[in-house]
Image (cartoon, rainbow, N blue to C red):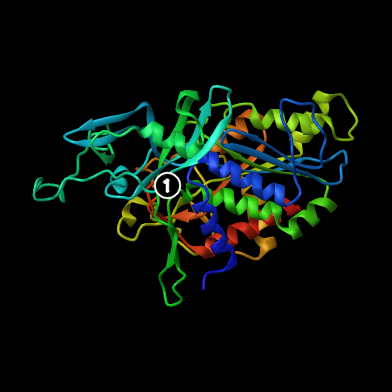
């Protein structure tokens, strides 16, 4: 039987089809642990354990014992994943089918979305500015042309983002927005706008190996794997006790919009985290003027940028670095890039390895093949915005950015342990 952590992870993913649902679920868990929600439009309450929600992003904090050398211990992740976003005019149709107008969000492995049972989820705003969470069951699919009609399909798949990835959702014309608004509890005439994303309705699965527990398959593991493990570590009783008795401020942050560049009001390139840190700092019992106080705290701070990475694919090992072959189940990744596409360097790497050693768990290193450039994360953005020591890490995945990614439960367990040790002061 899968572990308690793995079962909870499956539930978390099922409850979080979009960044907005993830923020709501994170807030629910923080409420349950006694954290106090701060309205950022109001005066800062100075709670020692609190959190903020902005759209699909969340920041939570836990203040320990404050001394002149107090700093922030930050674990950052992101709540969004590649998908298809519904266009402002959602309804379309052709040849007797009702279709949904969608736009590619981020960089999904497009062909993996074909022939899946897809739903829509996100938020609908009303004319008063209130946001209403909504989630449909499976209502649509992106049908692929049969091989009888395209004999080359198994040799070469070339599909148009505009015409070939247009889901069907009804026979004949049907009012999609009216259907969604009814589910959201919003009168159609009062609906102002929406942010709706496709999601795969298949539930997560654990399978493989003699125990039947080698693999965990699900969508949105990039990057709910990091959101879940960092939140679980942050809220663990042993972590909270260590933070209470330590000298730092533990920070959990899950940004939105990483998959499209982070340059939004709830993304890592914006001021969301910096503003929150400044407001936390301003209410700590520290001497010195506010700017000096904050600069001193930043100099004593660090950040783990947690974002899923790549396991070696046994069928395409030649595309990985020949001397770095991280695999599922052998531990989370320390991600390194000479051009700082990942923020890791020697000082930050020591922090990560020290935390792993404190937890007694293994870790691996990931570096790209020189002929296959790597992506990036919130790590360089955070390091640049705050001038803070940052290291990039994450669990290894197969089929990243596909509609159904594969991880190993053992890596989730190890990631949670390492992040707990980091929050606790390793």
Give the structural element (helix, strand or loop) at label 1.
Answer: loop
Q: Is residue 344 visible?
A: no
Which quadrant of the structure image shows residue 285?
top right
Q: Residue at x 63, y 39 (%)?
A: 58
Which quadrant of the structure image shows residue 48?
top right
Q: Residue at x 39, y 47 (%)?
A: 369
Which quadrant of the structure image shows residue 295?
top right
| Residue 302, percent from left and from top | 69, 41
Classed neighbour count for the residue bearing mark 1: other residues with Cα under 10 Å, few (<14), some (14–19), many (≥20) = many
| Residue 102, percent from left and from top | 34, 32
- Residue nearer the viewer, 416 or 392: 416
How many numbered marks does the figure carry? 1
Q: Is residue 388 left or right of residue 108?
A: right
- Residue nearer the viewer, 38 or 184: 184
Q: Is residue 27 visible?
A: yes
- Residue nearer the viewer, 173 or 37: 173
**Outermost residue to the bottom:** 210
| Residue 43, percent from left and from top | 79, 26
The residue singled out by tag 1 in the image is 368
Q: Residue at x 31, y 30 (%)?
A: 91
Q: Is residue 349 left or right of residue 68?
A: left
Q: Looking at the figure, which quarter contains the C terminus?
A: bottom right
Compared with 144, 361 (above or below) is below
Q: Is residue 296 left or right of residue 267?
A: right
Compared with 237, 226 (above or below) is above
């Amino acid at each position: 039987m899968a572990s308690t952590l793995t079962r909870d992870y499956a539930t978390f993913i099922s409850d979080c089809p979009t960044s907005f649902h993830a923020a709501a679920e994170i807030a629910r868990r923080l409420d349950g642990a006694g954290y106090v929600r701060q309205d950022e439009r109001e005066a800062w309450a100075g709670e020692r354990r609190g959190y903020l929600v902005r759209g699909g992003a969340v920041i939570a904090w836990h203040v320990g014992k404050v001394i002149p050398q107090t700093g922030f211990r930050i674990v950052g992740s992101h709540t969004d994943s590649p998908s298809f976003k519904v266009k402002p005019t959602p309804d379309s149709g052709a040849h007797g089918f009702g279709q949904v107008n969608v736009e590619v969000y981020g960089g999904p492995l497009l062909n993996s979305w074909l022939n899946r049972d897809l739903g829509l989820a996100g938020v609908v705003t009303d004319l008063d500015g209130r946001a209403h969470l909504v989630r449909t069951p499976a209502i649509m699919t992106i049908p692929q042309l049969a091989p009888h009609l395209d004999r080359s399909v198994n040799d070469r798949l070339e599909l148009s983002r505009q015409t070939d990835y247009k889901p069907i959702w009804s026979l004949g014309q049907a009012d999609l927005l009216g259907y969604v608004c009814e589910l959201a509890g919003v009168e159609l005439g009062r609906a102002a706008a929406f942010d709706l994303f496709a999601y795969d309705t298949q539930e997560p699965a654990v399978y493989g190996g003699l125990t039947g527990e080698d693999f965990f398959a699900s969508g949105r593991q990039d990057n709910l794997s990091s959101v879940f493990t960092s939140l679980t570590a942050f809220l663990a009783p042993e972590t909270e006790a260590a933070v209470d008795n330590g000298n730092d401020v533990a920070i959990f942050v899950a940004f939105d919009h990483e998959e499209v560049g982070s340059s939004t009001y709830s993304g890592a390139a914006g001021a969301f985290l910096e503003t929150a840190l400044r407001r936390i700092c301003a209410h700590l019992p520290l001497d010195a003027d506010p700017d000096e106080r904050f600069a001193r705290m930043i100099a004593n701070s660090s950040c783990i940028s947690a974002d899923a990475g790549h396991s070696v694919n046994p069928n395409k090992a030649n595309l990985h670095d020949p001397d770095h072959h991280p695999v599922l189940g052998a531990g989370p990744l320390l991600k390194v890039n000479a051009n700082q596409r990942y923020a890791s360097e020697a000082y930050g790497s020591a922090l990560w390895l020290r935390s792993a050693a404190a937890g007694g768990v293994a870790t691996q290193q990931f570096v790209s093949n020189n002929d296959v450039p790597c992506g990036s994360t919130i790590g360089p953005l955070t390091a640049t915005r705050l001038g803070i020591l940052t290291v990039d890490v994450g669990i290894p995945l197969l089929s990243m950015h596909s509609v159904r990614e594969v991880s190993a439960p053992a890596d989730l367990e190890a990631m949670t342990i390492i992040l707990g040790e980091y929050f606790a002061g390793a």
